Image (tube, rainbow, N blue to C red):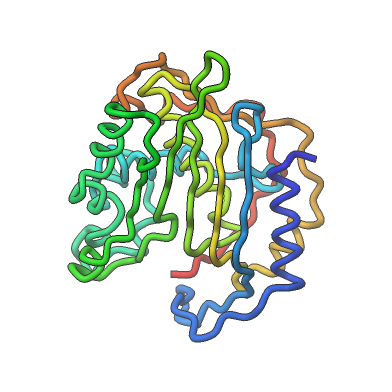
């Protein structure tokens, strides 16, 4: 069985059997009811992208294109303006987190990236010294949280390191996430940041190496338990999906588009499942 599917199955089983119940839960379902969950703490996974290990399950379809478009909205467009996400990319599900009728999600995500010049500083740091140990993206900025209301970032920190093996330079990445919806967002978030890792590697002409994924609170909401059991009943696909970035080495980070990514040999089990999101 592929690593990503085995990890997915193991995590679902662990949450359902060993997980504890949330208390004083903040999220609500759209009907106003409290979105309680069962969760575990301290989930970690390692994937070697250079060997074709990608963190995407085949037990259900994962909307990888919309996930990558969301990533570009944050790190290329560097805005929290929902009209950019909706009009430019056709992605509309972030409207649930709009602040009042402002048309944006507050001083969060892309707005934070722009304010602190996070991508510019990251690329500049690599340019000056690829071997330094300070290549970090951090969206957890308290002054931004105090500036406006808005959803606090879930996948909030990434760290990057280069590693030479023979004549090949690999870019490794570590994603740290404070909170993750195991059934809905787990593989979306992981593959988003693999895509970001690939974009940075292409910018410098490096190869992607390892991807490390740490989640502090990994949970399944109480209205998803039937879906969890359905996923456990499915047999994963035998194929091995691989994400490709079809641009030349040295392509500028900001010139990479969503259509440059291609997910090949992806044959997820269907039908897709319906999930009522917690807001």
Figure quadrant of the C terminus? bottom left
Q: Position of residue 232 (x, y in %)?
A: 78, 57
Q: Position of residue 29 (x, y in %)?
A: 48, 74
Q: Nearer the viewer, residue 146 or 57?
A: 146
Identify which residue is drawn at 35% across, 26% down.
256
Identify which residue is drawn at 50% across, 35% down.
172
Identify which residue is drawn at 43% across, 60% down.
154
Q: Position of residue 257 (x, y in %)?
A: 36, 28
In the visual, does 40 lie left or right of 119?
Answer: right
Q: Is residue 259 above or below residue 187?
A: above
Identify which residue is drawn at 40% across, 31% down.
131
Q: Nearer the viewer, residue 129 or 94?
A: 129
Quadrant in the rendering for residue 46: top right
Q: Nearer the viewer, residue 254 or 48?
A: 48
Q: Residue furthest bottom?
A: 24
Quadrant in the rendering for residue 50: top right
Q: Position of residue 189 (x, y in %)?
A: 50, 49
In the visual, does 104 lie left or right of 187?
Answer: left
Q: Is residue 255 above or below residue 122?
A: above
Figure quadrant of the N terminus? top right
Number of numbered tags placed on the structure image: 0
Q: Nearer the viewer, residue 233 or 198?
A: 198
């Amino acid at each position: 069985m592929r690593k990503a599917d085995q990890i997915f199955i193991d995590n679902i089983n662990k949450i359902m059997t060993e997980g504890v119940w949330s208390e004083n839960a903040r999220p609500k379902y759209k009907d106003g009811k409290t979105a309680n969950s069962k969760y575990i703490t301290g989930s970690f996974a390692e994937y070697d992208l250079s060997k074709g290990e990608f963190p995407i399950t085949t037990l259900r379809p994962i909307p990888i294109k919309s996930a990558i478009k969301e990533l570009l909205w944050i790190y290329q467009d560097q805005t929290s303006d929902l009209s950019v996400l909706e009009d430019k990319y056709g992605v509309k599900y972030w409207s649930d987190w709009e602040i009042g009728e402002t048309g944006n999600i507050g001083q969060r995500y892309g707005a934070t990236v722009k304010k602190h010049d996070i991508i510019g500083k990251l690329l500049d740091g690599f340019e000056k010294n690829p071997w330094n140990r300070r290549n970090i993206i951090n969206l957890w900025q308290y002054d931004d949280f105090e500036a406006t209301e808005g959803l606090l970032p879930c996948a909030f920190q990434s760290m990057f390191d280069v590693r030479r093996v023979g004549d090949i330079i690999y870019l490794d990445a570590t994603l740290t996430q404070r909170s993750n919806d195991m059934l809905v967002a787990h593989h979306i978030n992981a593959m988003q940041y693999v895509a970001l890792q690939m974009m940075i590697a292409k910018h410098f002409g490096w190869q992607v190496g390892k991807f490390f994924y740490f989640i502090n609170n990994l949970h399944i909401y109480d209205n998803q338990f039937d879906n969890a059991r359905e996923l456990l009943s499915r047999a994963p696909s035998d194929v091995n999906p691989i994400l490709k970035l079809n641009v030349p080495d040295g392509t500028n980070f900001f010139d990479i588009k969503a259509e440059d990514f291609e997910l090949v040999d992806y044959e997820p089990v269907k039908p897709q499942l319906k999930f009522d999101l917690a807001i």
